[in-house]
Amino acid sequence: MRIDLSGKVALVTGSTRGIGRAIADTLAAAGADVAVSGRDAARADAAAAEIAAAHGVTARGYAADVGEVAQCTALVEAVERDFGRLDVLVNNAGLTRDNLIMRLKDEDWDTVINTNLRGAFATCRAASRGMMKRRAGRIVNLASVVGLMGNKGQTNYAASKAGLIGLTKSLAKELGSRGVAANVVAPGYIDTDMTAAMPAEAKAALSSSIPLERLGTPADIAGMVAFLASDHASYITGQVFVVDGGLAM
């Protein structure tokens, strides 16, 4: 099965590194023009230049803090202005501020909810207008198995990711009649900069709790996103795709 996204324009938030960068690369490799966004303008521009050179597509960098609604709206509007359309929106940007609930500060709750959930709401709202007019579009929101299972010390993060699932299911029902599909990818433990910093013993213990006995890779997540962005997934909407090596089953 070959995934062909030629002629499509994709915006991937939080795509200067890690999972987001892998998603942007994979979509570009399938032929999509890509808007790369992150908080740091220079980093976004550099990532976009590398993606364009590697895959022969058009790629542009955008600076945006998705914790700010106005910046989310401006980001989508800029992409539509520069590329002429937006076919695929991938909400990948997210962060953590972990602590046990009795120690969790109000600002840490607000920061996580605003970035992970409110930011996705704002970009979805802005992107949905053009998608509905064109009667076509794909929205893929990155949640987490923590949003399904919960996790100690992550009440804010789990709430934001569970909320993202509810948001996406509602979007699927609202936008389906206009040809717009919305789905969730829920990663498990992925080998990124954060997990790379873990002690070897902790990483081994974590891997042993996963039926496939390894951490996932950013490419594992990117492949699922690319599938959902493609015509192969044209009859799929409102679903949660758990990519976790069997951890949450």
Image (cartoon, grey):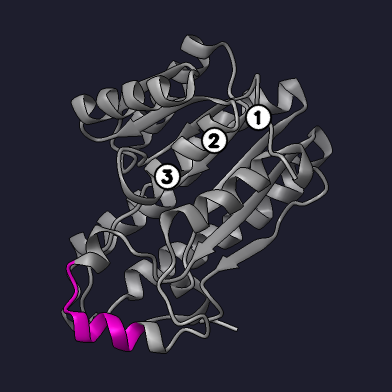
The answer to whether residue 152 is seen in the rendering is: no
**Dot 1 surroundings within 10 Å: few (below 14), some, or many (20 or more)?**
many
Helix, strand or loop at label 2? It is: helix
| Placement of 145 over or under 30, stated as above or below | below
Q: Magenta stretch: residue 66 in it? A: no
Query: In front here: 200 or 78?
Result: 200
- In space, the residues marked 2 and 3 are separated at their CA atoms by 9 Å
The answer to whether residue 58 is seen in the rendering is: yes
Q: Position of residue 85 (x, y in %)?
A: 59, 17
The magenta region covers 197-206
- Residue to which mark 2 is pinned: 27
Q: Magenta stretch: residue 198 in it? A: yes
What residue is drawn where x is 60% and y is 61%? 166
| Placement of 11 over or under 18, stated as above or below | above
Are the residues flagged by discs 1 and 2 in contact, CB closer than 8 Å?
Answer: yes
- In space, the residues marked 3 and 1 are separated at their CA atoms by 16 Å
* Mark linked to residue 111: none
What residue is drawn where x is 41% and y is 21%? 52
What residue is drawn where x is 57% and y is 50%? 223
What residue is drawn where x is 57% and y is 11%? 84
Are the residues flagged by discs 3 and 1 in contact, CB closer than 8 Å?
Answer: no
Q: Position of residue 4 (x, y in %)?
A: 69, 32
- Residue to which mark 3 is pinned: 22
- Residue to which mark 1 is pinned: 5
The tag earlier along the polypeptide, 2 or 3, is 3
- Residue 59 horizontal side relative to residue 198, left or right: right
- In space, the residues marked 1 and 2 are separated at their CA atoms by 7 Å
